[in-house]
Image (cartoon, rainbow, N blue to C red):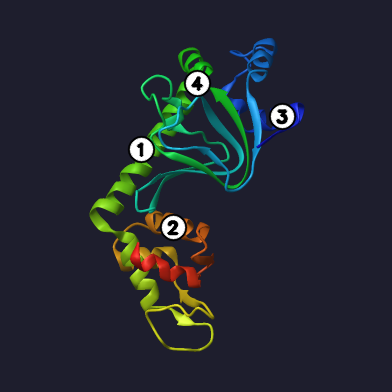
Amino acid sequence: MQPLKGGESKDRFLAVFGFLFPAGEWPQVKLADLLSRVHFRELEAGATILREGQVCASVPFVTEGSIRVFKAAESGREITLYRIEKGQSCILSVGCGSSLKTFPASVVVEKPTSAAFISTEIIRRLFSESGAFRDFVLDQYSRRMADVMELVEEVAFRRVDQRLVQWLLEHSSSEHGSSEKGSVSSQGAGLVSATHQELADHVGTSREVVSRILKDWEERGALELSRGSIKLLPEFEKLRSN
């Protein structure tokens, strides 16, 4: 990870997160002092920010790109807890140094990302002194809790992902004209004409759940999404056994 130029990185951070520092609470001298303590980084796709069990000393605020927070099983299977995208932060990291002594998940960069890292010590001070910051943290917390609760429902109760895999395989048609169902050729790709809402109706869940699963599979190279259609790539076959 490489540091950004000071002026450019600060301007980018304030363009996205400036609402956290209203002028009435943050005169220029005070804000400049805070920004001098923030570490700005450019992160390459695939970079590991934190591994499960490590000590977390700072909190990322994403100004561009995407970071994935996930749990990994001994078998190697991974499950995405949530993504941190532009204008968002990592709510789990906010608890580091107080309620969380070590980080309970792993964090990797999904695409080239610009982020500001603020120490947990400063985060605790901001939370106690700034109403705007508290509102932001509580909003992020409620959103992430909703994401995780939905994820628990998917994994523990519904196994929507496997029903979706099966349905897509059964309703795909080959780019090369083959009518064979239930598989994706290593030479070509299967095509499915369906909206996310139609898929949700077929497998008995919400459109938001389907969209999140499909986005995760797209990031893993298993399929390509376009408006009203889905292209299943050879990598999609591996989802059968997950």
Residue 78, given in percent of the width and then of the height, sits at 40, 51
Front residue of 131 and 211: 211
Crowding around mark 3 (Cα neighbors within 10 Å: few <14, some 14 to 19, many 20+) is few
- Residue under circle 2? 211
- Residue 145, numbered label: 1
Query: How far is disc 3 from disc 2 in space, using C-alphas?
Result: 33 Å
Kind of residue at badge 1: Met
**N-terminal label among 4 and 2:** 4
- In which quadrant will I find the N terminus? top right
**N-terminal label among 2 and 1:** 1
Label 4 vs label 3, nearer the camera: 4
Q: Does residue 92 lie above or below 112 as drawn?
A: above
Kind of residue at badge 2: Ser
Label 2: which secondary element: helix
**N-terminal label among 1 and 4:** 4
Quadrant assignment, res 33: top right
**N-terminal label among 4 and 3:** 3
- Residue 11, numbered label: 3
- Apparent side of residue 68 relative to residue 36 in the rendered image (left or right): left
Q: Residue at left 38%, top 43%?
A: 147
- Residue under circle 4? 120
Query: How far is disc 4 from disc 2 in space, using C-alphas?
Result: 33 Å
The total of numbered circles placed on residues is 4
Residue 145, given in percent of the width and then of the height, sits at 35, 37
**N-terminal label among 3 and 2:** 3
Crowding around mark 1 (Cα neighbors within 10 Å: few <14, some 14 to 19, many 20+) is some
Kind of residue at badge 3: Asp
